[in-house]
Image (tube, helix red, strand yellow):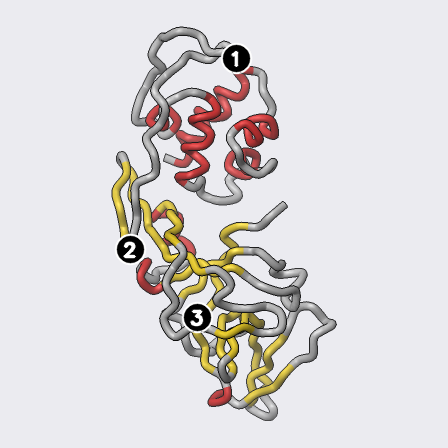
Amino acid sequence: MSEMFRSRLQGLIDQRGITMKQLSLDAGLSATAIRDALKRRASPQLSTIQAAARALRVPVGYLVGEVDTLEDGPEGAEGAPRTPLPPALPVVNAPGIIELGTGEYASVGRFDAALSAGHGSLLEAEPDPLGYQLFEAQWLRSITQAAPDYLAVVRVDGDSMEQTLSNGDWVLVDLTQRSFNREGVYALRIGDAGWIKRLSLNLRDRLIRVISDNTLYPIQELAEEELVIIGRVVCIVARRV
């Protein structure tokens, strides 16, 4: 589906003589969203496909290869045939796998400011998600084998992980990776505060080093029992530009 989407999207851009930046803006996306989708920087999100279809006035089915040709119809204001608008996103109220058209998508809970990359924030025991983020299931499996129930999309709050993570970034946390067995960026709890930090091992003293990638913040060294690992950060989901 991803290759078909890219091929047909590029064809429509060339045919209509518009720029990727203009299409992104017309679709209400970030200025680089269409470029990133075409350059294979990430599997296209369902919301990106739908927004592009609306801006181009073509069915979602055409962009993903479910429809072979565009139907003829009255010309729109920009010379594009008026075709039915793509269907709205399905209502998702639980994590899991859903089928949409011929593709599978995973819904993952999204949490706002549950963890901090700055001065710390209280982490509720079982916070309710603000909503659910859809990912193409095949792409998600290339990132992690965890089921959607054991994943969380979390907003980063603070600047202590600059240049790796910025304030307002959304990251995907794998909640099955709750033990420290390799260096990486983890969501963790120290006392009542939740954090996103880089962890490494002090081999000499057998302590875990809690590192802020922003060098203005000090490094802490803690015994394993002094922290609780919530999960490992496996990718950046969204970043403001």
* C-alpha gap between disc 2 and disc 3: 20 Å
Of the image marks 1 and 3, the number of the one nearer the N terminus: 1
Eye-nearest disc, 2 or 3: 2
Classify 117 as above or below 4.
Answer: below
Badge 3 amino acid: Gly
Circle 1/circle 3 CB separation < 8 Å: no
Circle 1/circle 2 CB separation < 8 Å: no
Residue at the spot of label 2: 94
Q: Which residue is drawn at 44% across and 60% down?
A: 111
Of the image marks 2 and 3, the number of the one nearer the N terminus: 2
Give SS at disc 2. loop
Badge 2 amino acid: Ala
Image-quadrant location for residue 7: top left
* C-alpha gap between disc 1 and disc 2: 40 Å
Q: Residue at x 56, y 76 (%)?
A: 199
Q: Which residue is drawn at 47% across and 22% down?
A: 56
